[in-house]
Image: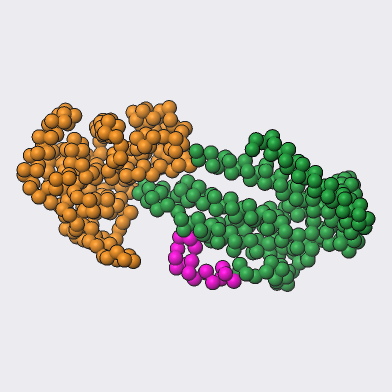
Amino acid sequence: MSLKSNVLLQGVSLLALLVLWQLAASIMESRALPPPVDVLAAILRGFEDGELPYNIGITLARVAASFVLAMAVGIAVGIVMGRNRTIDRFFDGWLVLFLNIPALVTIILCYVWFGLIEAAAIAAVAINKIPTVIVTVREGARALSPEYLEMAQSFRLGRVKTLRHVILPQLFPFIVAATRSGLSLIWKIVLVVELLGRSNGVGFQLYTFFQLFDVASILAYTLTFVAVIQVIELAGLQPLERHVNRWRR
Amino acid sequence: MAPVSRLEIDIRQKRFLPVGQARAHTALENLSVTVPEQQFLCVSGPSGCGKTTLLNCIAGLDRDFEGRIALSPVAGREHPVIGYVFQNPRLLPWRTVIENIELVLPDHQGHADTVDKLLEAMGLAEFRHTFPGRLSLGMERRVALARAFAVQPDVLLMDEPFVSLDEPTAQRLRRLLVRTWQERPTTVVFVTHDLREAIQLADRILLLSPPPGTVMADIPVTLVRAERSDRAAIEVFRTRLFREFPSLNGDL
């Protein structure tokens, strides 16, 4: 399918969703389901008083901080566990445990143990994400080509060069997979963290609107945030991926 | 000046432990050889006689053997430097030709000139920014050769670097190798199962026995280098070897 007809199809599909939404809203005529126009008005209002960009900015900063923390720790531990069988066997049980702890539990415990502070919020999100990064990166580290590692060893590349030029490029597809799933998971958890223990950010705002029964604002924040995440994916991740994969034919 | 021997190999035994269904296997036994500086040594023998294992022991990739390998670096170097040309070129596909070569060089030194000259000599100058995936196998092998020479190795290890090339290409690469080696002399240990290739390239041929590999014959190649491009001369020398060493296998 050509790019043009693809874009056209997606446009029509979005339009159909809007029409459906409008129809449902007119039939229900309830505050529980405001029509698209009301949501658009809420978005514009949010931009006018600055509340919407401010809170989205706060949430994005938390997403970024937890994301960087989770990826750094997850990649490092994933490589070590993928390359060392003893360490892998020793910590595998821990990993299974952490993989199965519900996000809500981690969040509550972090707030209980460290207090209602920013660091606890960031740590709680990162702890939820780290195990899945480890599992993904470990898979890649297990499959590293011994041929390239031997080349690196015989030419005495040293640890830093080997990591940067030999190991990380081979792990890149796995890191991208972890990033993709990470971004979508992390921003959802950040909202819960904000709802439970922060006084700003999208999650906090949603909670406020919930108490006011302001569904239009809830949808306004949600749609805007989804759009921002999409932009990050399209303008950040995809070009980066193309650049790093330019050597593939 | 008496030739300094930089490479002394004395392997009493190299065993591979049983893995799964595979039984333990002795790859090398009582293999003792001294390679004088700047000698071109070819190691040949039947398949499975431990030729690649020997290279891996010299390269330090395999330290699990009984015996000793001494390789002394040139003055001013802390460690001996090894150039390894593997059977598969093993170029990093996500780095360009020039990046692959610069990667193995020590940091913070002006190598640009050396690398440029080497690329020029190898006929790779216009491909410096090409990714290996876009090169033919013959070209990739040339890059691997350039990479190994670029480090100015104390010993250059080569593991059947010209197999699975068509004969004219292999022949061009052999000539290129000899020319480059004559311009940048170094000790070479070249593994091949092709006796004609060994005769054409080597100062000395080491024939290994079927496993466990040990030195079956140590043959100086007396042909002068100018005669090496003459097929007939190589054939005569090969026939003579077969007569002198009746145990030589017909497939060599």
Residue positioned most to the right: A29
> Can you tell which chain is drawn orange?
B
Residue shown at the point (31%, 56%) measured from the top left: B62
- Give A231 or A53, whichever is nearer the viewer: A231
* Residue B138, image x, y percentages: 34, 35
Tint of chain A = green
Q: Can residue A196 be seen in this view?
A: yes
Disc tally is: 0
Which SS type dominates the magenta stretch? helix
- Give B135 or B110, whichever is nearer the viewer: B135
Q: Can residue A52 be seen in this view?
A: no
* Residue B37, image x, y percentages: 21, 42
Residue positioned most to the left: B244
The stretch of residues the image draws in magenta is: A79-97
Residue shown at the point (22%, 51%) measured from the top left: B47
* Residue A106, image x, y percentages: 68, 69
Quadrant containing the N terminus of chain A is: top right
Magenta stretch containing residue A83, yes or no?
A: yes
